[in-house]
Amino acid sequence: MTAPSLSLRTGDPADLILSGRLVTDGLGRVEKQFAEIAATGRLLRVDLSGLEALDTGGAWMIANLGVRLRRDGMEIEITGATPERLALLKTVQEALPEPQDTLQDRNRFAAWVEGLGKSVVDLGKAVLSLLEFLGAVLAGVGRSLLHPGRIRFTALFSQMQETGWNAVPIVSLMGFLIGIVLAFQGAAQLRQFGAEVFVVDLIAVSVLRELGILLTAIIVAGRSGSAFAASIGSMKVREEIDAMRALGLDPIDVLMLPRVMALVLMLPVLGLIANLFALFGGALMSWLELGVSPGMFVTRFYENTDVWHLAVGMIKAPFFALIIAVVSCWQAMQVGGSAASVGQRTTSAVVQSIFLVIVVDALFSIFFAELGV
């Protein structure tokens, strides 16, 4: 292999003549010589006619020399290069990072405004994409309700088992512990006023209206929402979704609708189970800590708990389920072509689902408060 070499004739303009094979394997032989070239005038002509070969590494060395000399006020002109080598040099020059001093000298406020604007535009595009996906899912649900034969019952029942039945243990344990915590914390406060019996009202109202279904939705978002995003995202990476489209199958009907419908059907059931176990845990702790017997607990519960407390929580359940399922499936469809993208989108699905569930819960609380329910 002919080693690369260079000769420099100073003057204005100066001439840099390159010869040999300026490829990655031989760059170490001329690296020091390139580094010693300094700006001595207004123009440096780089003659590439003597080069036998030029690859991306050699083009990077020439482009980097040009960036350094231009910073010192000296222009660089390429001569004797074939169109292919000129195209390679142009591609490498465009890919070079912006010099650090240029980044530091940029107006920081303008850069902040630019970044803020890009973030707002990206957020707007994401919201529109999510709404479009929600519309497609709702249209698919409508078609399935009008034509029940389109429903894939095998997939639906499988998802109902996965998102519902398999989640019963963790939801039950969570509800039981929440009831215990509420009763224990309430006892510490109510005992000061001799109003221990009101712990029943505290547990009933907080669990049935808010905590039972909200914490169940958060558990389901972390458990089932992440599973939706990871499974569909992995299928997208393996191009299985593209294969479905090639076979004339709609991924909305095949993948999304069974998951959405299963979660909408099962989340109210899980919320009800969480409520029952929370009441049981609260009754147990009230009995042990405050001496409120199970009979007194049940009597107080029936006398002072309106059915609307339970209805408020159950009304919110399908909306929470729809948010979790749609956001998780939408994030899965945004997965790129790498395994890292699956992890990132799965994390985003869980975080966004929980955030939107809390926001919607707050809106429901305001709505029911205005109605006086």
Image (cartoon, grey):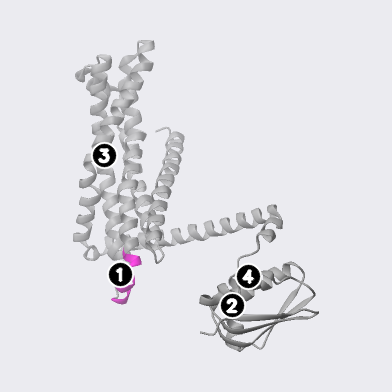
Choose the circle earlier in sequence order: 1 or 3: 3
Instruction: Determine whether label 2 and label 3 are within 8 Å by CB.
Output: no
Give the extent of the magenta segment. 235-247
Choose the circle earlier in sequence order: 2 or 1: 2
Instruction: Determine whether label 4 and label 3 are within 8 Å by CB.
Output: no
Q: Amino acid at mark 2?
A: Ala
Choose the circle earlier in sequence order: 2 or 3: 2
Q: Kindly tell me whether residue 330 is visible in this rendering.
A: no
Which residue has dot 2 on it?
59
**Nearest the camera: 234 or 75?**
75
Position of 366 with respect to 290 (left or right) is right
- The residue under the point 31% across, 23% down is 183
Which residue has dot 1 on it?
240
Magenta segment, principal secondary structure? helix
Label 1 sits on a secondary structure element that is: helix
| Label 4 to label 1: alpha-carbon separation | 51 Å
Q: Amino acid at mark 1?
A: Glu
